Image (spheres, rainbow, N blue to C red):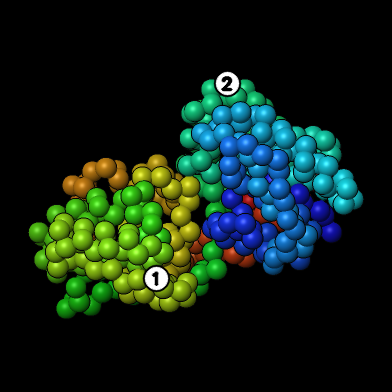
């Protein structure tokens, strides 16, 4: 069984919560690989690296690390070198001999992972997150050459979506080696046949997010777009799913009353399986975020039989042909957003028919756990073996 060493700055460890996308990816292939996770988080200005061991469904004896460094990426290269040195020493002390190192970003994680992979003389795999990676690449011109080398020399690149790859390539050059699109897996990946709205039913747009992030998730503009669209569809309703922050719940409820009175309501948090059932009943799902590296909720919605509205150049943009089962929109333009909502409502039957066809043809399998696990495993094995993978 191959041993994979993971360098990752956004992993759900015992120190601080994170999205479960990365841990689920590892969990899905834990029967095929031995995963050793080094999860690191900046916690203060100065200080030594502090770590604790932890186990999870992906493996045993991982390391959760806290390190001291200035904010805003100051002394980034020096700090990541210190982390890499610590990881190498810890791995050696435990007798770990990785067959491959996976860094889960090109930038922060990549600086660490590249050094670790070079030390052990093994291949490097990189995930690509459009949001974080492009932000750091834009800010750190002085490290562009280093990032470019990491990008080109990695054995395999795993972008979350096409926009992640193109955004990074625009900054540090076109990737020459193996690239495999690898969406984030989700536990809520049932396929539900789309349910067209009956003639007497009101159109319902649904959105879902942690309410604490309502600014980035752009709920104000979505409410403005809903109010505009409701001028032509008076029974239109926006359902807002999510919890996580009492103050944000209050602020959003006030926005609903002020911006789209009678056309928006908060429904609180829901569990994954229940979310997909609720999504299936909606006309469309809309989340026009300002920034979004992938957004597992879009995958959950599409698999649940619900067409999606997303921001252009972000998230899942490019995974599916524009206007088939998804629509992209400028997140800063409420008028354009309203037009997109109206189109999704008026063409609901056509969008859902195309989505049903895509589901039946297997075109949505790229979003499902079994496909993601197979592609990930095959490309890691191929990178270690130094051959072309046997799956597309």
User: Where residue 61 is drawn, which disc sits there?
Assistant: none
Residue name at image x 57 percent, y 34 percent: 70
- Graded by Cα atoms within 10 Å as few (under 14), some (14 to 19) or many (20 or more), the crowding at tag 1 reads some
In the picture, measured across the screen, residue 121 lies left or right of residue 267, that is: right
Q: Secondary structure at mark 1?
A: loop
Q: Position of residue 42 (x, y in %)?
A: 60, 43
- Label 2 sits on a secondary structure element that is helix
Decide which of tag 1 and tag 2 comes sooner along the chain: 2
Q: Which residue is mark 1?
A: 269
CA gap between label 1 and label 2 equals 43 Å
- Which numbered disc covers residue 142? 2
Q: Is residue 349 above or below residue 136?
A: below
Judged left or right of residue 167, residue 257 is: left
Residue 265 falls left or right of residue 4: left
User: Is residue 355 at all visible to an observer of this figure?
Assistant: no
Residue at image location 21% in from the left, 61% down from the top: 254
């Amino acid at each position: 069984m191959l041993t994979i060493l993971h360098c990752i700055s956004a992993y759900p460890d015992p120190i601080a919560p994170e999205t479960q996308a990365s841990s689920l990816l590892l969990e899905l292939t834990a029967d095929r690989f031995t995963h050793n996770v080094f999860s690191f988080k900046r916690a203060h200005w100065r200080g030594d690296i502090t770590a604790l061991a932890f186990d999870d469904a992906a493996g045993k004896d991982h390391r959760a690390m806290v390190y001291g460094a200035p904010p805003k990426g100051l002394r980034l290269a020096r700090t990541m070198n210190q982390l890499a040195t610590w990881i190498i020493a810890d791995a050696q002390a435990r007798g770990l001999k990785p067959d491959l190192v996976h860094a889960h970003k090109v930038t922060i994680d990549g600086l660490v992972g590249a050094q670790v992979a070079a030390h052990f003389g093994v291949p490097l795999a990189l995930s690509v997150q459009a949001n974080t990676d492009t932000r750091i690449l834009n800010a750190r011109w002085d490290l562009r050459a280093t990032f470019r080398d990491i990008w080109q020399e990695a054995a395999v690149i795993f972008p979350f979506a096409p926009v992640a790859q193109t955004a990074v390539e625009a900054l540090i050059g076109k990737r020459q080696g193996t690239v495999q699109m690898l969406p984030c897996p989700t536990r809520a990946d049932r396929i539900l046949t789309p349910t067209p709205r009956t003639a007497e039913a009101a159109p319902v747009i649904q959105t879902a997010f942690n309410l604490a992030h309502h600014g980035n998730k752009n709920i104000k503009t979505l409410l403005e777009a809903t109010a505009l669209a409701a001028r032509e569809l008076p029974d239109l309703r926006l359902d807002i799913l999510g919890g996580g922050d009492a103050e944000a719940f209050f602020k959003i409820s006030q926005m609903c009353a002020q911006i789209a009175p009678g056309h928006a309501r908060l429904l609180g948090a829901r569990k994954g399986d229940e979310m997909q059932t609720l999504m299936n009943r909606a006309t469309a799902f809309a989340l026009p975020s300002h920034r979004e590296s992938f957004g597992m909720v879009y995958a959950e919605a599409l698999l649940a039989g619900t067409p999606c509205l997303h921001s252009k150049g972000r998230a899942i943009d490019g995974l599916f042909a524009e206007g088939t089962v998804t629509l992209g929109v400028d997140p800063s333009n409420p008028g354009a957003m309203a037009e997109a909502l109206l189109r999704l409502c008026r063409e609901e039957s056509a969008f859902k028919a195309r989505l049903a066809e895509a589901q039946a043809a297997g075109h949505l399998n790229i979003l499902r756990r079994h496909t993601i696990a197979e592609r990930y495993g095959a490309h890691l094995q191929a990178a270690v073996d130094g051959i072309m993978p046997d799956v597309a």
